[in-house]
Amino acid sequence: MSWKDRPSAVLTGLLAIHLLAHIDRNMLLGFSPQITTDLALSNAQYGFLVGAVWVLSFGVMALFMGALADRFSRTRVIAAGVLVWSACTWASGHAESFEQMVMARFFVASGEAALVPAAVGLLAELFSEKRRSSAMGVFFMGIPMGIGCSFLLAGTLGASHGWRNTFYVLGAIGVGIAIVLAFLKDERDQQAHQERGAPFVRQVASIMAVLRERPSLRLIIAGFVLVHMLFAGLAFTQLWLARERGMDATGIATNIGMLQLLFGTLGSVVGGVLGDRLGRRLPGSQATLMALLVALCSAPMIAYRFAAPGSVIFYVGMCAGFFLPLALYGPVNAAIVSMVPQQTRSTISGFSMLCINVFAIAIGNLAVGWAIDDFGARGMPMPITHILLATDVLGISSALLFAFAARASSRQHISGSTVKWVQ
């Protein structure tokens, strides 16, 4: 029996690897006080490590790794990525300077960029369109679970064994997983030419051609990028709560971590299941569901910015903000891979990750920080509140793009065009 004959087991394995990836990614945040002290890092150096270093490496490499996964063995692309990021996680534990940590984290990001594009392409092959959104939702549970577990590990294993030993253990676990993955065969060179991706430059050109031909695809990716402005706001949430809402920073950090873990995971599951159960029945299909999810969460998210700290409205809005982005991962990724040729699925996933990391995470965080400083310098009261409210509005405005995508896909379907939304 081939390992591909057990899609549920494959999904479980990919979820475990995704969980490990996000633990490794966020350990730097979990151990930030210890690492910045031991390596004598300034705030600017630490910000560079968790921001620009990661985004530039991860975003660019995601597109390249996606193209490789469409052309060659996806399991070995993932195995190579796991090996690189795990070896460099281990190397992070040996870092004695800012420069050494920059090099290690750069290649951790490069390795992790291989996972999502290859995994999305593999899941799209193993799961039928009726189950694909749910499978994607389960896989992306690794994001909130990994974030939560990274902080829990930092507070338990890390407290007793230190950040360096924790990095060593995580690196060793990843290397073991990479060795096992390397033995799983996914021989793409035995497939028909039309089922495999082209060399990198031609593959990217084909993706650009698909994007030009399919306005609904462009709109969905643009909407997905815009939703991630909520993460740019999240980066400043603790600062906002402590400085402008008068809450205890230590206590709210614990609450944020637990609520994000709970409602982010819930969002992944609920959004994925709704994508399969409801998405295909709506006019405009998955894009209509995306617009509805954003609209449903919009009111409590806005009310949260004005509610009394600790009130029911306050926590409902906070949880809605954690729920929404992850709820979209299943239906968005299922829709995207269903709208492109089979041999470009991993590449288009890498392209969407590139857009998210560059425009929402890198530029978005930079713009939010700059705007807060500028508003504060001008003497505006509660500058953080105003800017975070703006990130909420930008994220919520993605509903318009999803609605336009639903309209465009419906027109294509009605017209009988060869380019249609495939469900």
Image: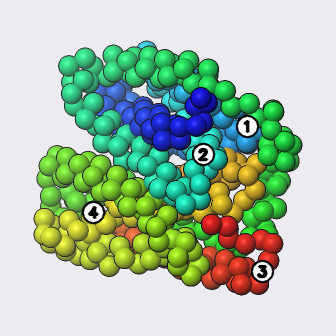
Q: Is residue 411 above or below residue 44?
A: below
Question: Toward the viewer: 162 or 400?
Answer: 400
**Residue topped by disc 1:** 68
Disc 1/disc 3 C-alpha distance (Å): 33 Å
Q: Nearer the viewer, mark 3 or mark 4?
A: 3
Q: Which residue type carries mark 2?
A: Leu
- Percent x, y of residue 114: 61, 36
Q: Residue at x 62, y 43 (%)?
A: 122
Q: Earlier in the sequence, mark 4 or mark 2?
A: 2
Disc 4/disc 1 C-alpha distance (Å): 37 Å
Looking at the rendering, which quadrant does residue 371 occupy?
Answer: bottom left
Neighbour tally class for label 1: few under 14, some 14-19, many 20 plus, Cα within 10 Å: many
- Residue 422: mark: none
Disc 2/disc 3 C-alpha distance (Å): 28 Å
Number of dots carrying numbers: 4
- Indicate left or right for 2 with 389 as reference: right
Q: Residue at x 26, y 24 (%)?
A: 158
- Residue 319: mark: 4
Q: Regarding mark 3 in the picture, which secondary structure is present there?
A: loop
Residue lying furthest front? 1
Q: Nearer the viewer, mark 1 or mark 3?
A: 3
Q: Which residue type carries mark 4?
A: Cys
Q: Regarding mark 2 in the picture, which secondary structure is present there?
A: helix
**Residue topped by disc 3:** 416
Q: Earlier in the sequence, mark 3 or mark 4?
A: 4
Q: Earlier in the sequence, mark 1 or mark 2?
A: 1
**Residue topped by disc 2:** 126
Question: Toward the viewer: 327 or 24?
Answer: 327
Disc 3/disc 4 C-alpha distance (Å): 41 Å
Disc 1/disc 2 C-alpha distance (Å): 19 Å
